[in-house]
């Protein structure tokens, strides 16, 4: 639930009257930042003096902050269902909300706030948006400064917003000065082997969305045959994330390893494992990233890719780390992050659109080239309008 904070708008603009909930690892000047952790944070992080740029920008354009929301501890997880406060799914009782921005999704879905600010390192805005029937926008790299945002993995972290409609996110885009593009995009889909890890219902939603978009834009679809394979995506993310988290906690936050005893065992194990990696492994991760970025930039030149938002329905609170597809159980991260990490490794913008099928929440994801944030939101509005009718 929302931890209430009252910060009035500092100006007027496209977001006049809009209420905002802020993930609890994003600075609100004068309010305690916790990251849902017992690890003692340095004073400069624990009690920020100034708003993070994303908070300041929204307030300057008419929005008022109404509270902070629960994160998976340090944002290092996709369930918001581990140590510390947990978040249940407000639209699917008995299921997790997803994470790590699960609290922001919960607050928006419950109507406690109009907009939710989150962070997205490997899908942490898009996952809870898809599972809580919201629109989730992961900003493209460089759209706004990450200052004042407690980092998880330097170089992979992005800010994002959640809302019940793309129209409100378009108003936020106006507030941030995000412009559209001057071309009609082509529509591409991943190859069959990329989609094979996802629930068939999630894949069907992808092709439903492709039909809607190609019809609306009067363009043909094509298959991204040169799409980097899922194994390369996940290997790259793994090789890059661990060392980036170590750098964040050691050099930026300043709590590792001095506060090791306060960290949960699973994070200690992850950090120890990351520290044990040699320079050759990190170099391999960067090589894979360069290849992924080059290939996706080529595929997505004036094109939008449609792919699953998560690839599965939200897991049960009893088995929060398992994806159930048919009668099979899979590791949740293997299924979900196949679909989400391409946007983080590449730094490209992505938007998830809510879709329900067979009583389950799946969502669909639109991935676009650099600078296409607004176009993705416009296409999301078109998809939701067509689907509703």
Image (cartoon, grey):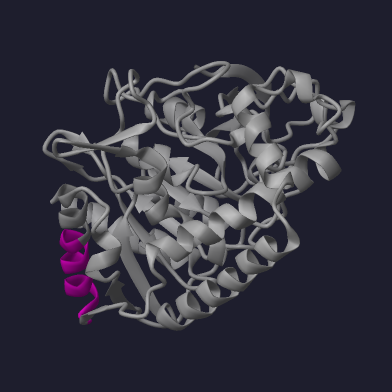
In the rendered view, tell whether residue 64 sits above or below residue 300: above
| 269 relative to 32 in the view: left or right | left
Q: Who's the residue at 51% across and 45% down the image? A: 161
Residue 157 x/y as whole percent: 63, 51
Residue 217 x/y as whole percent: 24, 76
Main SS category, magenta section: helix
Residue 375 appears in view: yes
In the rendered view, tell whether residue 331 sits above or below residue 316: below
Q: Quadrant of residue 225?
A: bottom left
Residue 111 x/y as whole percent: 41, 25
- Toward the viewer: 242 or 357? 242
In the rendered view, tell whether residue 109 sits above or below residue 229: above
Q: Magenta segment: does it hold 213?
A: yes
In the rendered view, tell whether residue 348 sits above or below residue 251: below
| 317 relative to 244 in the view: left or right | left
Q: Magenta segment: does it hold 88?
A: no
Q: Who's the residue at 48% across and 43% down the image? A: 125
């Amino acid at each position: 639930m929302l931890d209430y904070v009252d910060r009035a708008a500092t100006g007027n603009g496209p977001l006049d009257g809009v209420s905002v909930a802020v993930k609890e690892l994003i600075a609100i000047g004068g309010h305690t930042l916790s990251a849902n952790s017992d690890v003692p944070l340095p004073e400069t992080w624990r009690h920020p003096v100034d708003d993070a740029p994303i908070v300041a920008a929204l307030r300057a354009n008419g929005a008022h902050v109404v509270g902070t929301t629960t994160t998976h501890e340090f944002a290092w997880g996709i369930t918001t269902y581990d140590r510390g406060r947990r978040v249940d799914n407000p639209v699917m009782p008995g299921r997790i909300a997803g994470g790590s921005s699960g609290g922001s999704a919960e607050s928006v879905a419950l109507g406690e706030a109009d907009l939710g600010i989150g962070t997205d390192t490997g899908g942490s805005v898009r996952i809870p948006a898809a599972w809580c029937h919201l629109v989730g926008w992961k900003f493209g790299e460089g759209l706004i400064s990450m200052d004042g945002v407690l980092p998880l993995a330097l170089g992979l972290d992005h800010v994002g917003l959640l809302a019940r409609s793309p129209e409100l996110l378009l108003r936020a885009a106006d507030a941030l000065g995000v412009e559209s593009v001057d071309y009609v995009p082509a529509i591409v889909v991943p190859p069959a082997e990329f989609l094979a890890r996802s629930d068939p219902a999630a894949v069907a939603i992808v092709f439903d969305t492709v039909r809607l978009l190609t019809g609306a834009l009067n363009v043909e679809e094509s298959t991204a045959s040169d799409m980097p394979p899922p194994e390369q995506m996940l290997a790259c993310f793994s090789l890059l994330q661990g060392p980036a988290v170590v750098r964040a906690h050691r050099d930026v936050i300043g709590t590792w390893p001095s506060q090791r005893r306060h960290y949960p065992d699973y994070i200690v194990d992850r950090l120890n494992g990351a520290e044990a990696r040699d320079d050759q492994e990190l170099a391999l991760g960067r090589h894979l990233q360069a290849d992924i970025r080059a290939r996706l930039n080529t595929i997505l030149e004036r094109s939008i890719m449609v792919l699953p938002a998560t690839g599965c329905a939200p897991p049960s609170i009893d088995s929060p780390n398992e994806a159930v597809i048919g009668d099979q159980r899979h590791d949740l991260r293997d299924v979900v992050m196949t679909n989400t990490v391409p946007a983080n490794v590449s730094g490209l913008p992505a938007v998830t659109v809510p879709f329900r099928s067979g009583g389950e929440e799946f969502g669909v994801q639109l991935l676009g080239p650099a600078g296409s944030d607004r176009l993705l939101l416009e296409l999301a509005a078109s998809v939701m309008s067509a689907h509703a009718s």
